[in-house]
Image: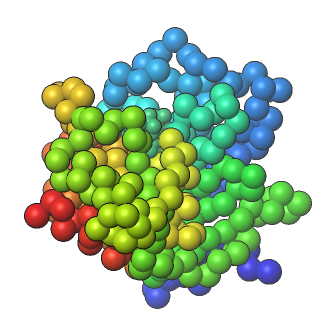
Amino acid sequence: MQRFDPVLRQDKVDLDLISLLNTLNTACKEISFRLSQGALAGILGSTTDENIQGETQKKLDVISNDLIKEILLESGLVRAIASEEEDTIVAGSPDGRFLVCFDPLDGSSNIDINSLVGTIFSIMEVPEGMQGANEEMFLQPGTAQVAAGYALYGASTQLALTTGQGVHLFTLDNTIGEFVLTTDKMTICEDTQEFAINMSNQRFWQPAMQQYINDLLAGDTGTRNKNFNMRWIAAMVGDVHRVLTRGGIFTYPSDNRNPNKPYKLRLMYEANPMSFLVEQAGGLSSTGYERIMEIEPTEIHQRVAVILGSKNEVETCLGYHK
Ligand code: AFP
């Protein structure tokens, strides 16, 4: 049995990074426990607050955010954090080497229906020579990530992690309170017949995405000559986990519902870490026009269009955007 051990998953042993990953996995175990108590702990439902994105905060959003924030800021390893649930960055240790971006509870609309949710995180280093803590130091492309991962709180709690040497999947063994390695190298198959998109937004998409999805729906009677199945979990963490496990294409494209908000998913908390994992597992990740991990961020709460998953299917989809 191989317990959670990022040491083995790195070429060079970086004790600080290992310690930071252990800190994060401790927070995830705590969130997993709270979620498992559900209604018994009185933690379901909403608060009266909204986050910076104008979304109603669930009680568990706030609890998870506070848990991760506190444990990271106390670690001495983190210069600052940026969270989907915080208006601005929060400073940590002046000597901390790392910057951590996270979505404490992705898919929070699933909490009250006892369905899949997860925690997504992305770790970068403070650029050389930068003192103090400010938003500017976070504005690095996804290629600067030194580690990324998610915890998925499902029938079992799993943790997918990359430090740039492939993607490793750990499962929480509640009998010993440890994450145990269950898949050493996750690989996304190149072809797929499964797609994930919120179809209720169809009329708002751009023509390229309209055409691509129409061709999938036409199945073996259309130009693709094969049938496609559809899945939508409404938690990116669940949809990406399925893609990593059995392939598929996941997309949250741009749409024209609200001209001030053409994209839904956040670059720093969702798109970049998931792109790092997907690329490390042999898949592709793009906005439709550029590789997500090469976007130069302009602000921490920035949003982007996302198309990711099985290599050949993503390439086909990108062909419609040329
Ligand atoms: P929340 O965590 O804010 O509820 O959002 C989850 C999410 O950003 C992403 O995880 C899902 O893929 C997407 O929203 C689901 O969006 P729909 O509401 O369109 O189904």
The residue sitting at the bottom extreme is 11
Q: Which residue is drawn at 40% across and 41% down?
A: 199
Based on the displayed image, in which of its 4 quarters is residue 271 positioned? bottom left
- The image shows residue 297 at horizontal and vertical percentages of 19, 51
**Figure quadrant, ligand 1:** top left
**Residue at 55 percent of width and 77 percent of height:** 186
Say which residue appears at 32% left-offset and 64% top-offset: 222
Please give the name of the residue rendered at 36% of the width and 57% of the height, measured from the top-left corner. 218
Nearer to us in this view, 139 or 154? 154
Q: Position of residue 248 (x, y in %)?
A: 46, 65
Asked if residue 207 lies left or right of residue 121, the reply is left
Q: Where is residue 290 in the image (x, y as percent from the top left)?
A: 17, 63
Query: Which residue occupies the extreme front position in the image?
Result: 221
Mark count: 0
Q: In which quarter of the image is the N terminus?
A: bottom right
Q: In which quarter of the image is residue 122?
A: bottom left
